[in-house]
Image (spheres, grey):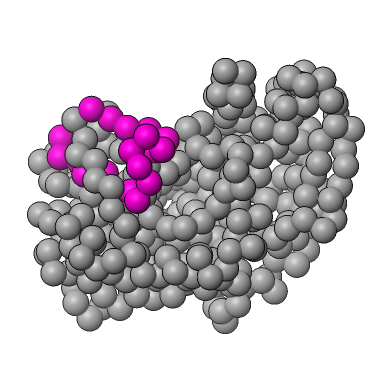
């Protein structure tokens, strides 16, 4: 990418999008257009010198407006959240297919040179994620297809759209499958937060109120890998600037149980809580981890921030927000 390219980041008012805009601006990119449907005062991060547009990108005309004159597009826009939101809002998640489809159409019309799509580990076949001691997921494990209902199907379909726009129309597309991204400047309450932020919030609430107990969704034995936001942004930009065109995992391979995640946040907070397990709450698959063989082969790199280190920063930021 050239520093004079017009770079459009959709979903820029969200967690990952805001960090991506910050990273691009810090590295000297001077023409950045940030797009989100939320009112500006609800964006997690805004920046002087960045063109901000409030548009609902489910519509084709809005996508055309957003991509006018664009050279590079990072599409991070979707209606999504943590497992509680995904399992209870399957139709809303599926409707995000309109965003990527219309953005691809507008990108082709506008002569965009390169288009990034943020997919998800939710595309992987559920039958490969039934055990807590899961075998890490390789890129080829997305097929035969049986992804997360709703959200996962939308992501997998949109991956195929990117592939065929590249094959049929020559639009260079790049696809990252994100695994559980966390960090500061993101949702930590309201139902759209991911597990690390939710656990940090619950531990902080217990500490501030003196009610030393915590509710955990499921039995706490389900396993995940959690990727710190800085690694996510580095991998995203690395992929966008590369010649690699197939979907690729961007995620940590540090597998932990939800119980262990709670342990780590308790250690950071200096508190020990009584645990109540809500076995009726949404908990997703039993186990999910990222196989990073491909990203190491292609880039000689993989996300490496230790969960404990990323949680310190995340906890401190959420504590600052809540203690206000």
The image quarter in which residue 268 lies: top right
In the depicted view, which residue is nearer to us: 108 or 188? 188
- The residue under the point 26% across, 75% down is 165
Figure check: 77 above or below 171 = above
Classify the position of the C terminus by image quarter. top right
Quick check: is 280 in the magenta stretch? no
Residue 309 visible (yes or no): no
- For the residue pair 295 and 205, the one nearer the viewer reads as 205
Residue 31 or 282: which is nearer the viewer?
282
Would residue 255 be found to the left or right of residue 165 on screen? right
Queried whether the magenta region covers residue 30, the answer comes back as yes
Give the residue at x 57% y 68%. Answer: 90
The residue positioned 72% from the left and 27% from the top of the image is: 205
Task: Describe residue 277's horizontal placement relative to residue 198 as left or right.
Answer: right
Where's residue 164, x and y in %?
30, 78
Q: Quadrant of residue 73?
A: bottom left
Quadrant of the rendered structure where residue 124 is?
Answer: bottom right
Say if residue 164 shows up in the picture.
yes
Count of residue discs? 0
Is the magenta region chiefly helix, strand or loop? loop
The spot of residue 43 in percent (x, y) is 39, 38
Residue at the image point whose x is 47% and y is 58% from the top: 79
Range drawn in magenta: 29-48
| Residue 285 x/y as whole percent | 71, 62
What percent of the width, then of the height, locates residue 101? Answer: 32, 71
> Does residue 225 sit above or below 63 in this rendering?
above
């Amino acid at each position: 990418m050239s520093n004079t390219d017009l770079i459009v980041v959709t979903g820029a008012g969200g967690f990952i999008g805001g960090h991506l805009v910050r990273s691009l601006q810090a590295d000297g990119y001077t023409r950045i257009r940030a797009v989100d449907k939320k009112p500006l005062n609800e964006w997690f991060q805004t920046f002087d010198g960045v063109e901000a547009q409030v548009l609902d990108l489910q519509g084709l005309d809005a996508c055309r407006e957003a991509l006018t004159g664009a050279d590079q597009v990072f599409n991070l826009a979707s209606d999504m959240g943590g497992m509680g939101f995904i399992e209870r809002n399957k139709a809303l998640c599926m409707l995000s297919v309109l965003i990527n489809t219309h953005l691809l159409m507008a990108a082709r019309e506008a002569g965009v040179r390169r288009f990034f799509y943020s997919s998800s580990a939710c595309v992987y076949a559920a039958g490969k994620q039934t055990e807590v001691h899961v075998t890490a997921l390789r890129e080829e494990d997305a097929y035969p297809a049986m992804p997360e209902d709703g959200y996962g199907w939308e992501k997998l379909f949109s991956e195929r759209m990117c592939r065929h726009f590249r094959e049929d129309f020559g639009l260079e597309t790049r696809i990252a499958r994100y695994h559980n991204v966390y960090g500061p400047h993101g949702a930590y309450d309201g139902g759209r937060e991911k597990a690390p932020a939710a656990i940090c919030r619950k531990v902080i609430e217990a500490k501030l109120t003196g009610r030393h107990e915590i509710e955990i969704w499921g039995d706490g034995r389900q396993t995940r890998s959690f990727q710190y936001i800085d690694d996510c942004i580095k991998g995203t930009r690395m992929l966008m600037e590369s010649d690699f065109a197939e979907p690729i995992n961007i995620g940590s391979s540090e597998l932990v149980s939800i119980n262990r995640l709670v342990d780590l946040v308790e250690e950071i907070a200096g508190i020990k809580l009584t645990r109540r397990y809500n076995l009726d709450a949404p908990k997703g698959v039993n186990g999910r981890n990222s196989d990073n063989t491909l990203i190491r082969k292609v880039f000689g790199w993989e996300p490496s921030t230790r969960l404990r280190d990323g949680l310190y920063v995340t906890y401190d930021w959420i504590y600052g927000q809540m203690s206000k």
